[in-house]
């Protein structure tokens, strides 16, 4: 059912009589509809029309309780949208300008009697603070990731390829009830681990490699995200220094993060430790982001973010150090921010794992 007590104030704040929703994550959040084809129209008289096509009508009727499910057959999305706006006397209709294509906008404007108001993704604000049900799903998604990591360490050996390891991570997570990956797994070995978002390749793991594993799954629509870095064989002195610096930075954030902090304050905890250890400029991405129905959601914690991270936000904490030609380390957990700290959903070990050779 649509949470009208949350939606109507958004319409009022926008000065809109209706809103046209195309962001599929917002549609799922508001209605429970899980497919990726459809447009939702909300009006200030508490009407919700979900427009889709024949392939998904039965699914929409089963999932989108409280919605008038409409078949686009014989018309078009823009015609259906404009009909709803006219029938409900909507003089002003907001639309998501970062989601709506120019073609879709033109199609609506051509026949629309309402004034179209381009707005930012205001509905994502409703999704920032997770409900108890959302937290439970996110916790299970992260737990599936923990299980996958416990299994994949037994597959990390010289000769195994990055692509092989990525495929097995996906397999292990699906065995545990995941519906798929929340993003394509990152498996980066040796010099490739210096690239934060390296794509898995046919490169074989070798003795002495850092191997960074960044992966997550989708469980009942909700995403998980975690990263661990291991060494094939024994780590050398510099590898240990890099690893321990990243781990110390991450632990400091986990000890200090709490609701009410600015994103840049959270980021600064880790960045200061990394810089003071002699690795300034080697941590080039932000510390973290929220996770929910999408793998990257606001709020964000980075060096520029003035946004307040409130209690109830789900955030990644993922500092890293990346050195070209040497390799890199990232350690990432998913945490629920609370008023006075955080709850870590990830349980996989973080002390440096050295994979025995010839096991």
Image (spheres, grey):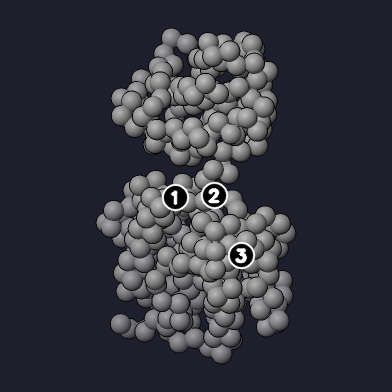
Q: Mark 2 points at which residue?
A: 128
Q: Mark 1 points at which residue?
A: 131
Q: Where residue 70 appears, x then y in whole percent?
A: 41, 18
Residue at position x 45%, y 87% in the image = 234
Q: Where residue 90 appears, x then y in whole percent?
A: 60, 16
Instruction: Count up the numbered dots.
Output: 3
Name which quarter of the figure residue 264 lies in.
Answer: bottom right
Under tag 3, what secondary structure? loop
Q: Mark 3 points at which residue?
A: 287
Q: Compare residues 178 and 292 and report the one nearer the observer.
A: 292
Residue at position x 60%, y 22% in the image = 17
> Tag 3: Cα neighbours inside 10 Å, few (<14), some, or many (≥20)?
many
Under tag 1, what secondary structure? loop
Q: In this view, does 332 lie to the left or right of 63?
A: right
In the image, which is nearer the foreground, mark 1 or mark 3? 1
Q: In this view, does 55 lie to the left or right of 89?
A: left
Q: Is residue 29 above or below residue 48?
A: below
- Location of the N terminus by quadrant is top left
Residue at position x 53%, y 10% in the image = 87
Q: Distance between the residues labelled 2 and 1?
A: 9 Å
Q: Distance between the residues labelled 1 and 3?
A: 24 Å
> Tag 1: Cα neighbours inside 10 Å, few (<14), some, or many (≥20)?
few
- Location of the C terminus by quadrant is bottom left
Q: Can residue 207 be seen in this view?
A: no
Name which quarter of the figure residue 50 lies in.
Answer: top left
Instruction: State yes or no: discs 2 and 1 in contact (Cβ < 8 Å).
Output: no
Q: Where residue 186 appears, x then y in whole percent?
A: 48, 61
Q: Is residue 326 visible?
A: yes
Residue at position x 58%, y 62% in the image = 259
Q: Compare residues 54 and 356 and report the one nearer the observer.
A: 54
Residue that lies at the very extreme toward the front in this rendered image:
5
Q: Compare residues 20 and 8 and report the one nearer the observer.
A: 8
């Amino acid at each position: 059912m649509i949470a009208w007590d949350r939606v109507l104030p958004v319409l009022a704040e926008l000065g809109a009589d209706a809103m046209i929703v195309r962001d599929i994550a917002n549609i799922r959040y508001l209605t429970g509809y899980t497919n990726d084809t459809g447009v939702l129209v909300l009006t200030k008289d508490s009407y919700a029309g979900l427009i889709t096509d024949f392939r998904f009508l039965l699914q929409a009727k089963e999932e989108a309780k409280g919605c008038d499910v409409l078949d686009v057959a014989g018309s078009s999305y823009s015609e259906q949208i404009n009909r709803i706006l006219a029938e409900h006397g909507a003089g002003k209709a907001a639309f998501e300008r970062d989601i709506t294509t120019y073609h879709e906008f033109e199609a609506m404007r051509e026949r629309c009697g309402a004034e179209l108001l381009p707005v930012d993704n205001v509905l994502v604000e409703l999704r920032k603070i997770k409900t108890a049900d959302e937290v439970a799903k996110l916790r299970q998604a992260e737990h599936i990731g923990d299980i996958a990591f416990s299994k994949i360490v037994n597959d990390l050996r010289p000769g195994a390829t990055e692509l092989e390891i990525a495929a097995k991570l996906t397999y292990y997570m699906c065995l545990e009830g995941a519906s798929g990956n929340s993003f394509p797994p990152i498996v980066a070995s040796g010099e490739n681990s210096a690239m934060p978002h390296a794509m898995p390749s046919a490169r074989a793991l070798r003795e002495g490699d850092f191997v960074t594993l960044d992966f997550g799954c989708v469980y009942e629509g909700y995403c998980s995200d975690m990263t661990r870095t291991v060494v094939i064989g024994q780590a050398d002195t510099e590898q240990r220094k890099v690893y321990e610096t990243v781990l110390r930075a991450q632990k400091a954030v986990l000890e200090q993060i709490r609701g009410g902090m600015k994103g840049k304050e959270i980021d600064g905890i880790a960045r200061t430790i990394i810089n003071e250890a002699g690795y300034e400029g080697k941590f080039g991405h932000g510390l973290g982001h929220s996770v929910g129905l999408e793998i990257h959601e606001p709020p964000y914690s980075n060096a520029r973010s003035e946004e307040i991270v409130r209690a109830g936000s789900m955030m990644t904490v993922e500092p890293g150090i990346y050195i070209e030609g040497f390799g890199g380390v990232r350690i990432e957990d998913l945490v629920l921010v609370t008023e006075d700290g955080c709850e870590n959903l990830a349980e996989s070990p973080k002390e440096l794992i050295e994979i025995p050779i010839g096991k």
